[in-house]
Image (tube, rainbow, N blue to C red):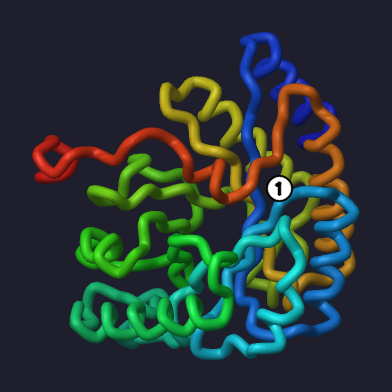
């Protein structure tokens, strides 16, 4: 059974190496004020951990923008366009699958970005969170032309740059079991996921901040309790640091258009 002590042991290893492990927090599917959103904002304020809120553009209400107006620790990300599934029958859900015409996907993203800019202004960051954490690879090189310079999914990235001018910083710890109606997956599974990513990053030249992924509208009591403990526990370790989305994505210049990565 993986324990909090094992998490501390891994973080101690970072400290012994003279390094700090970075963490960031992303919450998905926001559209409007609600009791669940209030619980999320209360937890954020109590923990003092920066939060990136992924908002669904087509469903976003002006009341949400007003609620977030004075909350400096909350950044807003674009969560697709309408969170609508366009994948063919039998495939995993995706708003932007490879089978969908590129022009249609880009039109939705452009429309969604315009609405997000109108609602959230400078609070909006140039980061796309594709619904279900899936997006066709062929769309990625087009995103910077829409003003999107970051993309965030789930599980460890393959490369820090998903395309020229497009950085990828993912999430890695999701406490919800989506096969059981988003019930809590359990403390052991959560801690094991965190430790696995941290160990991998400790051996990586270009480490990726560990991303905590939450869904405020779907959590049960056990999930909320774990999130609160995880936020505070990590914040209390000297070799760990919660960073905001700007810092999580702020790593170095993009590859040039003539680099092997850019031309591949």
Above or below for 114 versus 249: below
Q: Quadrant of the N terminus?
A: top right
**Nearest to the observer: residue 187 or residue 218:** 218
**Nearest to the observer: residue 217 or residue 30:** 30
Quarter of the view holding residue 151: bottom left
Q: Is residue 133 left or right of residue 2?
A: left
Above or below for 221 versus 198: below
**Nearest to the observer: residue 8 or residue 119:** 119
Q: Residue at x 68, y 69 (%)?
A: 215
**Nearest to the observer: residue 235 or residue 173:** 235
Q: Is residue 72 left or right of residue 109?
A: right
Residue 63 is situated, as x and y percent measured from the top left of the image, at: 71, 88
Quarter of the view holding residue 136: bottom left
Q: Is residue 97 left or right of residue 124?
A: left
Quarter of the view holding residue 29: bottom right
Mark 1 Cα shell of 10 Å, populated few (<14), some (14-19), many (≥20): some
Q: Which residue is mark 1?
A: 189
Residue 53 is situated, as x and y percent measured from the top left of the image, at: 63, 66
Q: Quadrant of the C terminus?
A: top left
Q: Residue at x 34, y 84 (%)?
A: 108
Residue 194 is situated, as x and y percent measured from the top left of the image, at: 66, 40
Q: Residue at x 22, y 65 (%)?
A: 142
Residue 156 is situated, as x and y percent measured from the top left of the image, at: 46, 44
Q: Secondary structure at mark 1?
A: helix
């Amino acid at each position: 059974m993986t324990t909090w002590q094992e998490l501390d042991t891994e973080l101690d290893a970072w400290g012994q190496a003279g390094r700090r492990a970075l963490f960031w927090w992303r919450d998905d599917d926001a559209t409007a004020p609600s009791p669940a959103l209030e619980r999320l904002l209360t937890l954020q304020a109590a923990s003092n951990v920066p939060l990136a809120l992924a908002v669904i553009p087509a469903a976003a209400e002006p009341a949400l923008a007003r609620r977030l107006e004075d909350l400096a620790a909350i950044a807003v990300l674009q969560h697709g366009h309408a969170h609508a599934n366009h994948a063919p029958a039998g495939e995993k859900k995706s708003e932007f699958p490879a089978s969908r015409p590129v022009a249609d996907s880009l039109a939705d993203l452009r429309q969604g970005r315009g609405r997000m800019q109108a609602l959230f202004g400078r609070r909006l960051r140039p980061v796309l969170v594709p619904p279900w954490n899936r997006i066709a690879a062929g769309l990625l090189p087009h995103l910077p032309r829409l003003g999107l310079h970051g993309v965030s999914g789930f599980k460890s990235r393959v490369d820090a740059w998903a395309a020229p001018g497009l950085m990828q910083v993912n999430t890695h710890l999701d406490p919800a079991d989506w096969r059981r109606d988003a019930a809590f997956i359990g403390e052991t599974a959560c801690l094991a996921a965190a430790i696995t990513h941290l160990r991998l990053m400790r051996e990586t030249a270009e480490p990726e901040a560990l991303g905590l992924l939450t869904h405020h509208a779907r959590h049960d009591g056990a999930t909320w309790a774990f999130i609160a403990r995880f936020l505070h526990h990590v914040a209390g370790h000297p070799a760990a640091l919660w960073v905001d989305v700007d810092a999580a994505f702020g790593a170095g210049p993009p590859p040039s258009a003539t680099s092997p990565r850019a031309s591949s």
